[in-house]
Amino acid sequence: MLPKGWSTPDRLEIDEGFIQTYIYPDKSYLSILCGDVEFHKQEIVKENEFAREEKYNGFSIIYGNVKSNRKEEFDATLNLMKK
């Protein structure tokens, strides 16, 4: 379900919920937030890099630093999670 190739999973547990982040070798990331956790996707996006945030049933899924050649793959993951 996640885009392939993540190398570093990171989980942060806090009182309001948790943040699970998958980091890729090219510095792109995908984060899943649960609970009342707030995390804002990057506001400044470099040329040919993309970020997106979606909310589903109490979860937020955010990706960032995604290069144009992988955007379709990351979008497909978020679209699949919406179903």
Image: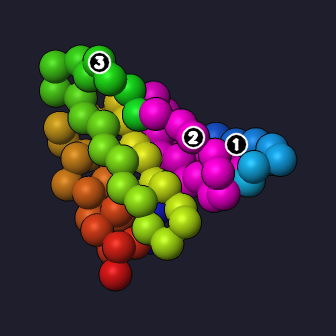
In this view, 56 is above or below 10: below
Q: Earlier in the sequence, mark 1 or mark 2?
A: 1
Could one spot residue 49 in this view of the protein?
yes
In magenta, the rendered stretch is: 18-40
* Location of residue 13 in the rendering, given as x and y in whole percent from the top left corner: 80, 47
Helix, strand or loop at label 1? It is strand
Q: Gap between marks 1 and 2, in whole Å?
A: 16 Å
Q: Which residue is mark 1?
A: 10
Q: Gap between marks 3 and 2, in whole Å?
A: 18 Å
Q: Is residue 17 left or right of residue 31?
A: right
Q: Earlier in the sequence, mark 3 or mark 1?
A: 1
Q: Is residue 58 left or right of residue 53?
A: right
| Residue in the image at 34% along x and 81% along y | 83
- Marking on residue 38: 2
* Location of residue 54 in the rendering, given as x and y in whole percent from the top left corner: 36, 55
Kindly identify the amino acid type of the residue bearing the numbered disc 1. Answer: Asp
Kindly identify the amino acid type of the residue bearing the numbered disc 2. Answer: Glu
- Is residue 72 highlighted in magenta? no
Kindly identify the amino acid type of the residue bearing the numbered disc 3. Answer: Ile
Labels 3 and 2 touching (C-beta < 8 A): no
Q: How many marks?
A: 3
Helix, strand or loop at label 3? It is loop
Q: Nearer the viewer, mark 3 or mark 2?
A: 2
**Local crowd size for mark 1, using a 10 Å CA cut-off: few (<14), some (14–19), many (≥20):** few
- Which residue is nearer to you in this view: 42 or 37? 37
| Residue in the image at 16% along x and 27% along y | 48
Q: Which residue is mark 3?
A: 44
- Quarter of the image containing the N terminus? bottom left
**Local crowd size for mark 3, using a 10 Å CA cut-off: few (<14), some (14–19), many (≥20):** few
Residue furthest bottom in the image: 83
Q: Is residue 11 left or right of residue 78?
A: right
- Which residue is nearer to you in this view: 3 or 40? 40
